[in-house]
Image (cartoon, rainbow, N blue to C red):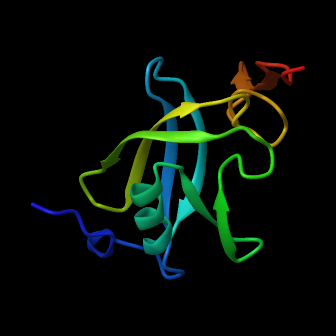
Amino acid sequence: MSFDPASLKFDANGLVACIAQQHDTGEVLMLAWMNAAAVAKTLETGRVTYWSRSRQAFWIKGESSGHVQRLVGLRVDCDRDCLLALVDQTGPACHTNRRSCFYTGVETGDEVELMQPVR
């Protein structure tokens, strides 16, 4: 069966959440948004492409920073309203220069910084 990005359940803005996970370690790197065209472009090029809600434009991960996400695999959740991109991440995934956007933990009611920016 052929995959059609239009078969996904997009929100009212035409977007679907996409979680990026490092393919070989399972590390959760980030969450961003895709529209149908970004999903298609990602599958076509192998470079993970998101939709920037603030700029209203495509955002090819690593295009300006060099911190590229190469697509290894794409998974669709059971409700078809969320994607999991298995990626090979070069450099930090977070715009704060950390490996993951999930660098803040909540421990015993306090926020704790779990990782420092990459130097």
11 to the left or right of 51: left
In the image, what residue occupies the spot 75% across and 40% down?
66
- In the image shown, does 37 or 114 lie closer to the viewer? 37
Q: How many numbered marks have been drawn onto this rendered protein structure? A: 0
In the image, what residue occupies the spot 80% across and 25% down?
110
Identify whether 41 is placed above or below 57: above
- In the image shown, does 65 or 106 lie closer to the viewer? 65
Task: Identify the image quadrant of the C terminus.
Answer: top right
Identify whether 34 is placed above or below 48: below
Task: Identify the image quadrant of the N terminus.
Answer: bottom left
Q: Position of residue 20 (x, y in %)?
A: 52, 41
In the image, what residue occupies the spot 53% across and 49% down?
47
- In the image shown, does 5 or 32 lie closer to the viewer? 5
In the image, what residue occupies the spot 43% across and 73% down?
36
Q: Position of residue 68 (x, y in %)?
A: 65, 40
Which residue sits furthest bottom? Answer: 12
Residue 52 can be seen, yes or no: no
Identify whether 2 is placed above or below 112: below
Which residue sits furthest right? Answer: 119
20 to the left or right of 60: left
Occupied quadrant, residue 103: top right
Which residue sits furthest front? Answer: 45
Residue 43 can be seen, yes or no: yes
- In the image shown, does 112 or 116 lie closer to the viewer? 116
Q: Position of residue 69 (x, y in %)?
A: 58, 40
Q: Position of residue 112 (x, y in %)?
A: 80, 22
117 to the left or right of 30: right
